[in-house]
Amino acid sequence: MAKDDLGDLVVLDADAVRARLTFAAAIPVVREAMIALSDGRVRQQLRSFLPWGEGKTFAIMPAAMSDRGVFGAKLVSVFKRPDGAKAHEGVVLLFDPQSGAPVCLADAGEVTAIRTAAASAVATDALARPDAAVLTLLGAGKQAAAHAQAIAQVRALRQIRVWARSDRQAQALAAQLAATLGIEAHAAPMDVALAGADIVCTVTAAVDPILSAAQVDPGTHVNVVGSSGPAQAEIAGDLVAAGRFIVDHREHVLAHGGEFLRAKAAGLVGDDNIAAEIGEVLAGARPGRTRADEITLYKSLGHAAQDLAAAAWLYRDATGKTL
């Protein structure tokens, strides 16, 4: 943590964010942010994307949380690495609601990694069966590791299965998770990894679907996380149509949710197939899972409300001051 020349601007680098913002802290923060997003306490615009060459995007995500007096933005670059994974780099900037001065600058890559997995944990807690104990990760990058740690906070996991295009990476992540979480974890082919899974997280850089309805058992909860724009889709349209489809934010999914947009274009779903926003489920305004054998789907795009709520928590933790 450091203070910049701009007076009281607190700067939190990746190490500082990682050290302070645990999943135990982030999950309730993100939960409240998603309720606020759905009940109108958050003002935000659609994310603005600026393509910057092959596999490179600059994005701006502004928002204001009226009940907290918190406003700011995330500025992030998303670059595709040589191994196919996506790297998020940038900053989350918070402003003082009284003076308008910037007060906190936090590493966006680390905030994104933590709040995204925390949001999936929030959705999993609301939508997965209470006895869900087998987690399958499709993907073996930073988000896959974060998702295992976060979901272990909300369900008593007894087994974690990892599939990735690189078996070496899948094996390495499984070994890491077994050592850090003390949970049985192993790499597996996709069909083996999915058989009998209770919770599935798609955290890949796939442009086209890797998961279809026939591969998902009844009663499974699926977090669809890796795709973040209209040109990408991790799950097939038949799975979108087969499950109870719950989103982080309806307006954004209708504009940027690649899986839903492809299913809609194919005539498989209409806008009314979006059953609810997760904030509505959390607030009790709409039902989540309605049957034990129902497939539930949570489409995560990520929102500035989550980033700002996390940054506000970090600022309070670092300074003892509440915005």
Image: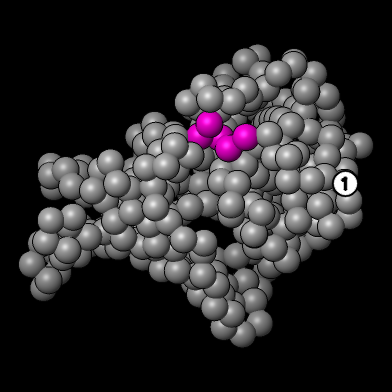
Which residue is at a point 64% across and 59% down the rendered structure image?
255
Query: Based on the displayed image, in which of its 4 quarters is residue 293 positioned?
Result: top right
Considering every residue shown, the one lying at the far bottom of the view is 53
Residue at 75% x, 15% y is 292
Camera-side residue: 132 or 278?
278
- Asked if one can make out residue 19 in the rendered structure from this viewpoint, the answer is no
Quarter of the image with the N terminus is bottom left
User: 111 or 32: which is nearer to us?
Assistant: 32
Return the residue at label 1.
268
Q: Looking at the picture, tell me which residue is in the foreground, 246 or 140.
A: 246
What is the x, y in percent for residue 308? 34, 51
228 lies left or right of 267: left
Q: Which residues are magenta?
A: 276-280
Residue 194, above or below 71: above
Percent from the top left, x then y, of residue 145? 56, 45
Q: Circle 1 — which element?
A: loop
Residue 290 percent location from the top left of the image: 70, 18
Q: Residue at the spot x=68%, y=34% of the render?
A: 275
Membership of 293 in magenta stretch:
no
Residue placed furthest toward the left: 7
- From the top left corner, tell me how far across and down residue 27 is, in percent: 43, 34
